[in-house]
Image (cartoon, rainbow, N blue to C red):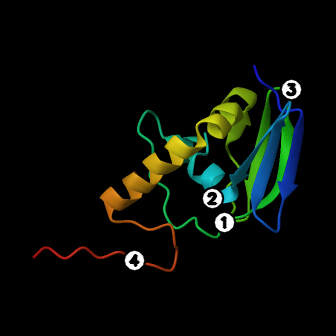
Amino acid sequence: MPIPSAIKLHKASKTLELRYGEQSYSLSAEFLRVHSPSAEVQGHGKPTLQTGKLNVGLERIEPAGNYALKLCFDDGHDSGLFTWDYLHELATRHDQLWADYLAQLSAAGKSRDPSESVVRLML
């Protein structure tokens, strides 16, 4: 189980920095929010596509025993426990996971921007 050697919350840039030895990863609050391991997001085998999370930030992080972090987002979401294994997976697979998320948004005709509504015209 890879445990970060350092964890830093950067509120201004809305990022969480994780360091594993010499390797450092910066994960945006939006990325973490849309990949929350909570039942609200992951469902019970059928994940719910998260939309409009472009401006979400992290208010605080809290330890959850010796195995996870509880991330508290400024949109009120705080029910997912990010285990050390899951955080490491998010960090190391970031680019592919983000590309997959953007493709899902596009396919659903949804947006990252909460003030934007996408309309598809069938011509």
Q: Is residue 26 left or right of residue 55?
A: right
Residue 20, x across and y down, in percent: 82, 32
Residue 51, x across and y down, in percent: 48, 62
Residue 7, x across and y down, in percent: 87, 43
The mark that comes first in sequence, 2 or 4, is 2
- Label 3: few (<14), some (14–19) or many (≥20) C-alpha neighbours in 10 Å: few
For marks 3 and 1, give the CA distance: 27 Å
For marks 3 and 4, give the CA distance: 41 Å
Query: Any mark on residue 66, and which?
Result: 3
The quadrant the N terminus occupies is top right
The mark that comes first in sequence, 1 or 4, is 1
Quadrant location of residue 108? bottom left
- Label 2: few (<14), some (14–19) or many (≥20) C-alpha neighbours in 10 Å: many
Q: Residue at x 63, y 38 (%)?
A: 90
How many discs appear? 4
Which is more toward the observer, 6 or 24? 24
Q: Residue tagged by mark 1?
A: 56
The quadrant the C terminus occupies is bottom left
Secondary structure type for disc 3:
loop
Q: Are marks 1 and 2 in contact (CB under 8 Å)?
A: yes
For marks 1 and 2, give the CA distance: 6 Å
For marks 1 and 4, give the CA distance: 17 Å
- Label 1: few (<14), some (14–19) or many (≥20) C-alpha neighbours in 10 Å: many
